[in-house]
Structure formats: structure tokens, C-alpha cells
Amino acid sequence: DGCDEIIYGSMVVNNDGTGLHSTGLGHGDALHVSNFDPSRPGFEVFMPHESIKSNGGIGTSFRDARTGEILWTTPGDEDVGRGMTADIDPRYPGAESWASNSKTLYSAKGEPIGKCPGSFNFGIWWEGTLTRQLLDNAGKKGDWHGVVYRWDWENEKQVTVWENKEVRSNNWTKGNPVLSGDILGDWREEMIWRTKSGDEIRIYVTPHPTEHRFVTLMHDPQYRLAIAWQNVSYNQPPHPGFFLGEGMEQPPPPAIYVPIQE
């Protein structure tokens, strides 16, 4: 309708301040919103849940963002601390989803399709492919450094594609950088990390070429908001307002007017 709604966990606030819908499934420590299933109209929301004993044993849910209709769920028996959604397997349409209480990877339709990654924190478009890589931390407990993995879907294992032991992650096990996003404008995403001493922040840029061309993601309204929401509450990776992944359609150009000084 041309207005922004606020998706706050299991409930949504309409642009007039009234409640749009609530699933009643309770709190969760992660939330992902985008067009994860391009075969359906509109956006979807994937999230893990904490209140398993009071929500009917639902560990994660995948729902229609506009109506709140639950499209599929996975079971749980205790707090599901983390969950992630990204297109990491090009064999299946849309984005895949997985969570920390299970070793199973699910398709956009909720079908179990294999083993999932052991990384649940952030996604990043780093290698120039339409599939997304995984941004996380590694190392000793409490002294974690930055790392990026590629999901090797053929062998079902994580492959390290970037690692730097001079930088440190934030927010304990959540493995967050200071910020990640398309801040330089070539659609691939940069990472900002702090050093161990805390007296520097460093920006890391992908060294990988790409054959794909898009308008900078920062001109997508949802993605631009996502850079702000990334540092609100529990940090979450930014998602654009269109499906960006294997088999995607070219997104429409943003309706932005840039004044030119004569």
C-alpha cells in the first residue's frame, strides 16, 4: 500500500499504529523478512521461537508477511536460539532456511533437503555469486574473530573463504561484525570489523569479480532500512525487498529522482 509496516517478532504493526496480525507463537531471537519464495506474491518471514512449551511445540515458522498465514513450521522442544534464511543451494528455488536446534536444511516450501550449515548468524554476498555466503565468527570462546564461509551444497560442508584473526566480532555467540552491507554500491557486500585492541575499525571489500550487475542495493528501500535495523535489538543480516538468488528475475529499477544542478 506504499506504507511501511513494523514486523516485530510474531506480530506486525500497521502504518496507522494498529495491529495488523499476530501469530501467537511468541518471542524469537532472529528474524528474516524478504521475498524468500518467489513463486508466491509478497514477502515471507522466517523466525525461530523461544516459547516452545506455550506455542504448541513450534521451533521455527515461515509465514506470509502480509496476512500472517503460517506456511510451514518445524518442531522444537526448547528455546531455538538462532535461525537463518539465504539462498545457499542453487538446486532449489528461493531461499533455504535452517535453525540451531536441527541439522536439517529446508527449502522455501518447507521440504527437508539435506544437512544444514553449522553457521546460523549472518549472510553476505561476498564471492560475486547469486547464492549467499555465511558471515560468522570463529576461534576461542570469548575471543572470536571474523570469518566467511561458502556452503558446499554438493558435499554438505562449510568452506572457509575469508578469515582474519586481527578483527573481533560483537555480541558474543551471535558473531556480528560492526556492520555488513553494500556500502560501496556494487551490490556485493562489504564488512566492517573492529580490531582486537578496539582502536580501529576496518572495512573489508570482496576481491572476487562478478558477472552479475544490479543497481546498488542501498537504493532498494527495504535494504536501506535493513542497514539501520541490523544494529537494532539482536543484529540481523540485511535482506532486500526482492529475491536475490539463483534463478532470480532482474529487479525493477528503483523509483528515485536525482536532481541535477545546472
Image (tube, grey):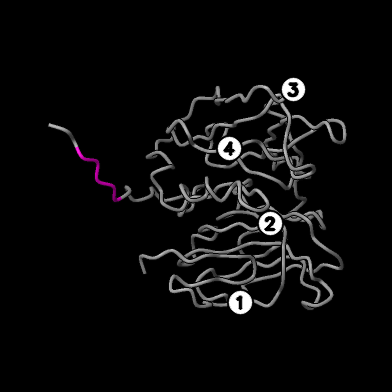
Specify the amino acid type for callout 3.
Answer: Ser
Query: What main secondary structure does the magenta stretch of the protein show?
Result: loop
Mark carried by residue 180: 4
Q: For the magenta stretch, what is the residue range?
A: 255-259
Mark carried by residue 97: none
Pointers 3 and 2 in contact (CB under 8 A)? no
Task: Identify the residue at horizontal 50%, vertical 77% (top origin).
Answer: 18
Specify the amino acid type for callout 4.
Answer: Ser
Mark carried by residue 197: 3
Instruction: Answer with mark 3 or mark 2, whichever residue precedes in sequence.
Output: 2
Specify the amino acid type for callout 1.
Answer: Ser
Judge whether 116 appears above or below 137 on screen. Answer: below
Quadrant position of residue 111: bottom right
Pointers 1 and 4 in contact (CB under 8 A)? no
Quadrant position of residue 50: bottom right
In this view, the residue farthest toward the front is 199
Instruction: Answer with mark 1 or mark 2, whichever residue precedes in sequence.
Output: 1
